[in-house]
Amino acid sequence: MRRDRIAVVAGAATTVGLVPFAVAGDVARLVRDPRLIALDVAVGAVFSLAALVAPAARGERLLMWCVGTAWLAGSILPAAGTLHQGLLAVALLGYPAGRIRGRPLAGLVAAVLPQLGVAALFGAIAAYLVARRRHPYPAVAAAAMALVLFGEWAAARFDPGTAILLYEVTLGAVGVAFPFAARADAIRRGRLADRLLGPGTAGLAGLAAALAGSLGDPTVAIVPADAGAAGRRALRVDDDQGRPVAIVRHSSEALADPPTAAAVATAVRLVLTKTRLQREQDDLLRLQAQAQARLVAAADRQREQIAAELKERVERRLRRAGSALEPVRSDARNGDAAPALEVVARELDSAIREITALVWAVPPAELGDGRLAGALHSLARSSPVPVSVTVTAAAGRAAETALFYVCSEALANAVKHAGAGRVRIEVDRRDGAIRATVADDGCGGADPYGSGLQGLADRLAAVGGRLRVDSPPGAGTTVAATVPSARPGVEPAHS
């Protein structure tokens, strides 16, 4: 920053120091009109001032300052009268970065060619810049210089004074337009990252397509840092620690502008960061889903074990006790104990019914590979209301277990809360997924956000499924559960 201030002060001081000598040179060349002298000095001052205030690259500002200095020097040394044209040709070709690699040849040609040749040179520069789809300012400036030089050459024999005046006004306009063009480019660069990161940009491929459209360069490609430049122009993108993370291959002159290159590099870094964070989030969600599925499976296994133990150890013993109690109750000798024995019998029946209710919603066997059909038929046979079952698809263990619990819970709700007289259960395959539908003719009005149905939705989410509940008041309830599956279907089973 301090070096820039020193350069600005030195440049301003040099320009101011040259002004008196330029005025003296004009007077020595018998220029008597003060207005012409003022215009002559103003052209050089305009370029120098524009170079000092323009928000452009340091190299481009230096070239423009040299154009103004060379113009003033031409008033002092007539032999240097065409030097500003060569420097301006280099500045326009090097815009906006001010790079002069390979450009001095154009400046040398402009300095030695006759006026008509210089006009043709600026015309060729304008055509080149338009063909390369460069910034509009240098192309328009080069075209204006070509026209005014050709016009000055054509009008020199008729009205040389007017021709020179028109040339100076045009040259001054090029200098005046420089800071405004640089400012417009700075605004465009500021918006470049926003355009590149718009809603249509997805990953590095989308960013490369957006960048190709913005720069007008179909060769743009963004590759990993270890891929190299592959013989083309390349912009290396580093992370916050200075380590290379990507290479932007291109054929565009626009990325020679450091601020533009910085904006593109920022966009690439942001996309890479977003991609990394998205990948980490996806991994975290996948691990979370896997953990949830393991927890659900562990709970199901524990529930199945408890149900098996209740049936084998408790329910069977209670039934044996009930069977042993029957002869005692029928023995007339136990007439005094009959009321107590009746209470015992009722309690045994009540305990058996409670155990049956507890294990009713647990699948009777390990599910998967089509065993869901048998489990649902068994569930239907235990239901106090008529249930029709149609199964035409199969899935894996986790999916069939989740669907069984959805069907059992929906059937229990239909019996206990909806007052249903009939229930229909269908399991089929649609669009690569397995869908279980439980429909009843009850009173409807079920709350899809209640704890029971929400628990089923969470269970389905653990296997990548989803739950939908349609329960208008008075029109029955339909519960639909869908889980992804690519397993082949089984033979239809009906009841």
Image: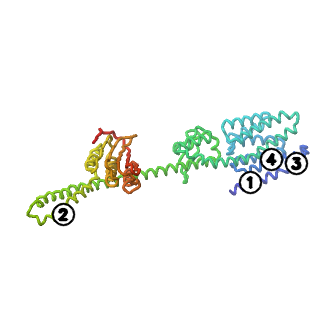
For the residue marked with disc 1, what is the amino acid?
Val
Circle 1: element type: helix
Badge 1 or badge 4: first in the primary sequence: 1
In the foreground, 352 or 41:
352
> Farthest bottom residue?
336
Q: Residues within 10 Å of mark 1 (few under 14, many from 20)?
A: some
Distance of label 3 from label 4 (alpha carbons): 15 Å
Q: Residue at x 82, y 50 (%)?
A: 18
Q: Amino acid at mark 4?
A: Gly
Front residue of 367/150: it is 367
Number of the label disc, if any, that sits on residue 8: 1
Which one is closest to the eye, mark 4 or mark 2?
2
Position of 286 with respect to 167 (left or right) is left
Q: State which quadrant residue 120 falls in.
A: top right
Disc number placed over residue 24 in the picture, else none: 3
Q: Nearer the viewer, residue 225 or 279?
A: 279
Quadrant housing residue 159? top right
Q: In the image, what residue type sits under mark 3?
A: Ala
Q: CA distance from mark 1 to mark 4?
A: 16 Å
**Vertical side of 358 occupied by 484: above or below:** above
The residue to which callout 4 is attached is 44
Label 2, label 1: how far apart the Cα atoms are: 109 Å
Say if mark 3 contacts mark 4, CB within 8 Å.
Answer: no
Location of residue 450 by image quarter:
bottom left
| Colour mapping | rainbow
Q: Which mark is residue 481?
A: none
